[in-house]
Image: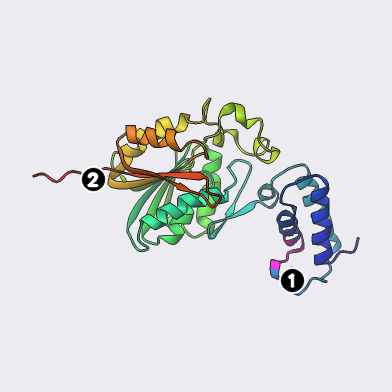
Amino acid sequence: MTLTLLKAWGMAKARLEAVGLPGPVIDARLLVEAAADATRLDIVTDPHRLLTAEQVAQLEDYLERRSRREPVSHILGRKGFWKIMLQVTPDVLTPRPDTECVVDAVLKATGEHERLSILDLGVGSGAILLAILAERPNAKGLGVDVSEVALAVARDNAAHLGLAGRCALLRGDWADGLSDAGFDIVTANPPYIASEVIETLEPEVRVHEPRLALDGGADGLDAYRRLAPEILRVLKPGGRFAVEIGYDQKAAVEDLFRAAGAAGVTTQQDLAGLDRVVLGEKRALETPA
């Protein structure tokens, strides 16, 4: 089969549309770029470049896998997040644009050259922690995850981004064993999908994402019940937290953090206008009279 970049993109779109995949235009372009070792600019400026036989075969393999609902991030082994590129495997949750709201919230609350100690609970691929460290050169971070294979992915990402020197990664169960009042910032994107809802999700998530990173228990709030008091414990007085939530969990999660003693609890929406990040802080120590 003889294919140019432009024809390959059109063929790929048609193949993915035929099996009813959402977002076929972007998926098709990403797969063509990867198979043909091309960029988006190449498709625009050199649309008649021919793919080699090996590149056509590679594209066919990619399209077959995507047609079976394997995520593009797993097919290519990488995913862009914020301003960084991350390695992704089936052992970690694929970073999503919604989670960039956590990064955005932390950056808005901190100064570019501020010295910060950051804790990311459930670090996964390292997306949140590494995106923040890349923007805050004087910050140092600790990422904790119960999954050793997830930590291996995060370590590789930290190394490839040149951030390993400012990032420690630890196997643990949320904040268990961490000292009190040790961090300026705590972030988390815990599992928040109710158990019975998981089976209704798209195959890309239900089949290919780690259930450990999805299942939030019967009502989706199990992790927050543990995290709220623990996050307040490990924050320094005046320290801030930012945790991702499901679109319908604002009131419940805010109440959990207020009950744990958090101050200034608010919720930030994502670009779709959905509640996405609960923010707040640990009360500062009172000054003696």
Question: Residue 231: where, in percent of width, then height?
Answer: 36, 38
Q: Are marks 2 and 1 in contact (CB under 8 Å)?
A: no
Residue holding disc 1: 44
Q: Residue at x 32, y 40 (%)?
A: 234
**One can see residue 164 in this view:** no
Q: Quadrant of residue 49?
A: bottom right
Q: Earlier in the sequence, mark 2 or mark 1?
A: 1
> Residue at 56% of width from left, 51% of height from top?
97
Q: Is residue 38 magenta?
A: yes
Left or right: residue 68 versus residue 156 is right
Side (left or right) of 181 relative to 245: left
Which SS class for mark 2?
loop
Q: Position of residue 100 (x, y in %)?
A: 51, 52
Report the predominant secondary structure element of the magenta stretch. helix
Magenta stretch? Answer: 33-40
- At horizontal 77% and vertical 63% (from top left) the residue drawn is 36
- Which amino acid type is shown beneath numbered disc 2? Ala
